[in-house]
Image (cartoon, grey):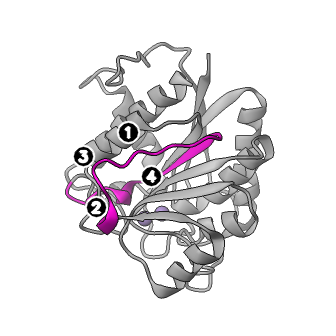
Amino acid sequence: MTKLALIGIRYDENSSFTKGAADAPPQIRAALRSEAWNLTSEDGTDLSDDSTFFDAGDIQPVAGSEMPALIENSIHTLLADGLSPISLGGDHSITYPIVRAFARKFNNLSVLHFDAHPDLYDSYQGNRNSHASPFARIMEQKLVKRLVQVGIRTFTSHQREQVKRFGVESIEMRHLRSDLKLEFDSPVYISFDVDALDPAFAPGVSHREPGGLSTRQVIELIQQLKGQVVGADIVEFNPRMDPLHITGTVCAKILKEIAARMLKG
Ligand code: MN
Ligand code: MN
């Protein structure tokens, strides 16, 4: 059976507007283990057994220039041990080194990317490692076969050009249909930026963008997804922006549904 690995990445140095996402991993772990609810996904998958998750702990931040290699090597080690990593961010810049590690194992990887933002800037505020740029790096290095984005509602003309340049399949929020079915014929990695959700559901993000997905829509897309999910991340949860302490719970709920989907194979 697939064994899942949880790894926290306490890093938000590439967040452009405000910091705080580095504080997220312990909050998501606490929400996941809270006695306020159970560890069973909606399809009945029991995630409470000690053997379900190998907890790899948190990667503590090191000097900025060394961090991407540390993330890539940590994920590579988990994959080499036969584990399927789920990373808890951290800002979205962590997804580039994570996908680099996955691409070493899977030569036909696809990425399903939930986000309000396309994160395709060639550079942002002069930073090519910005959390607004990971998918530009992933696509220019041809690390993945397909990049499918869902929930996008902040396109600039530069980012529209990047979509064309890289052949990104971007499903904008304004075009989202209720009967959308996501299908992949190669291993798929899910990158979940919490701001894909409407801030009414998940206010604890650095860049609140109204008009987003409901928690229910995300859960249904994950449950109905066709394809083998081999890894995932949940990024951009910012506890400092979460006065009602609701967003960690939402992250834990989505984590449970992604984990159950991964175990289904
Ligand atoms: Mn993002
Ligand atoms: Mn975003």
Give the tally of numbered discs: 4
Q: Which of marks 4 and 3 is nearer the N terminus?
A: 4
Q: Which mark is residue 246?
A: 3
- Compared with 110, 39 (above or below) is above
Query: Where is residue 212 drawn, in percent x and y?
Result: 28, 61
Q: Which of marks 4 and 1 is nearer the N terminus?
A: 4
Query: Magenta segment: does it hold 248?
Result: no
Q: Single out the mark in the foreground, 4 or 3.
A: 3
Give the alpha-carbon distance from disc 4 to disc 3, as whole Å.
15 Å
Query: Where is residue 214 drawn, in percent x and y?
Result: 25, 51
Query: Where is residue 123 drawn, in percent x and y?
Result: 61, 81
- Compared with 22, 246 (above or below) is above
Q: Which residue is drawn at 45% across and 35% down?
A: 258
Residue 71 shows in this picture: yes
Quick one: SS at disc 1? helix
Label 1 sits on residue: 254
Which is more toward the observer, 32 or 139? 139
Is the Cβ of the residue at disc 1 closer than 8 Å to that at disc 2? Answer: no
Q: Which amino acid does label 3 sit on?
A: Ile
Quarter of the figure that contains the C terminus: top right
Q: Which amino acid does label 4 sit on?
A: Asp
Q: Residue at x 57, y 78 (%)?
A: 121
Q: Which mark is residue 212?
A: 2
Q: Earlier in the sequence, mark 1 or mark 2?
A: 2
Q: Is residue 71 left or right of residue 168?
A: right
Q: What stretch is highlighted in magenta?
A: 173-200
Q: Single out the mark in the foreground, 2 or 3.
A: 2
Label 4 sits on residue: 23
Rendering quarter of residue 116? bottom left
Q: Residues within 10 Å of mark 1 (few under 14, many from 20)?
A: many
